[in-house]
Image: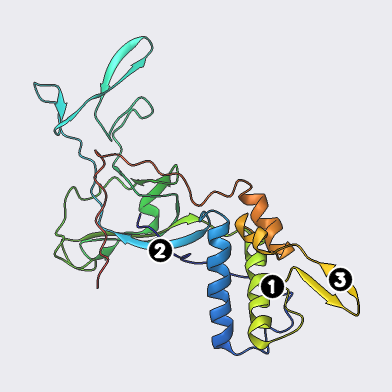
Amino acid sequence: MAIRTEPCDWPIDAGCCPEWDDTPEEDREFAQRVASELVWRLSGRRFGLCEVTLRPCRRSCAEPTAGGLVGGAPFTPYIRDGQWYNARCGCSTDCSCSELCELALPGPVHDIVEIRVDGDIVPAGAYRVDNHRMLVRTDGDCWPLCQDLEAAPDEPGAFAVTYRWGIPVPPGGQYAAGVYACELIKACAGSGACRLPKRVQQITREGVTMAFIDPMRFLADGLTGVPEVDVWVMSVNPHGLRGRSRIHSVDHRPARRSTWP
């Protein structure tokens, strides 16, 4: 998947923000975007659902050749009941006695929005998703082995899969983003009730000196200084990871995705 710089979708819960309903919609949208981006980054860029349309390639099930190859790829050997077998890649394996028509989608796949083959929508009952990534055809038909990439997704010759991938934002993340968005609105309005930390370390009034913790220490630790937000961030990202681990294979042929226009 493409590298993201902001969350695709991060709903917020602003139920504890009395100022929310009285704030102009434009200001609310801006505060929501800023708050959700910040909480998404601090939580390790793990949450949020993204909708994407891919033009995938199905794995072939060619017959074995004399050289022991399948469609140009080697067999996958496995043992069953003490006997060695060679599985044809992406087809029948030690887990399936019959050949499966399947293709791998970058995941984790949350749900399928729409699948089109030759411009026609494939019924939802004609496929399933296994292991949050394998798209399996179940109606006896099979996914196209190739397609016309010059055709639009809704035109004949095209094969397009639209789906949502990622991990849904949990209630705690929605609440944390809502709290921070509320504080941003207060700060923008100049409200004295704003709890966003200010870099004040010491105040002296009438001979009394008060010392404060430098709020920049919170930022250095990947926190915000707002307790409701920081409690959730620490619960899901206690080690301050900046993102999920990724594994890339030079042998993997990714599905095509149109990125412009």
Q: Where is mark 1, residue-wise?
A: 198
The image quarter containing residue 148 is bottom left
Side of 186 where 153 appears, left or right: left
Instruction: Specify whether residue 199 is in view.
Output: yes
Q: Is residue 10 visible?
A: no
Find disc 3 in the rendering and name its residue.
209
Q: Residues within 10 Å of mark 1 (few under 14, many from 20)?
A: few
Front residue of 61/6: it is: 6
N-terminal-most mark, 2 or 1: 2
Q: Mark 2: which secondary structure?
A: strand
Along the line of sight, the residue nearer the viewer: 20 or 218: 218
Task: Give the Cα separation between the discs numbered 3 and 1.
Answer: 17 Å
Residue at 10 percent across and 25 percent down: it is: 65
User: 1 or 197, which lies in front?
Assistant: 197
| Label 2 close to label 1 by CB (< 8 Å) | no
The mark found on residue 51 in the picture is 2
Closer to the camera: disc 2 or disc 3? 3
Q: Is residue 90 above or below residue 160?
A: above
Q: Quadrant of residue 10?
A: bottom right
Task: Name the secondary structure under disc 1.
Answer: loop
Q: Earlier in the sequence, mark 2 or mark 3?
A: 2
- Asked which secondary structure carries label 3, the reply is strand
Report which quarter residue 150 is drawn in.
bottom left
Q: What is the spatial separation of the Cα atoms under label 2 and label 3, in whole angstroms?
A: 54 Å
What kind of residue is marked 2? Answer: Glu
What is the x, y in percent for residue 176?
66, 65
Residue type (three-letter) at the residue carrying disc 1 = Lys
Single out the residue that lies furthest toward the right. 207
Q: Amino acid at mark 3?
A: Thr
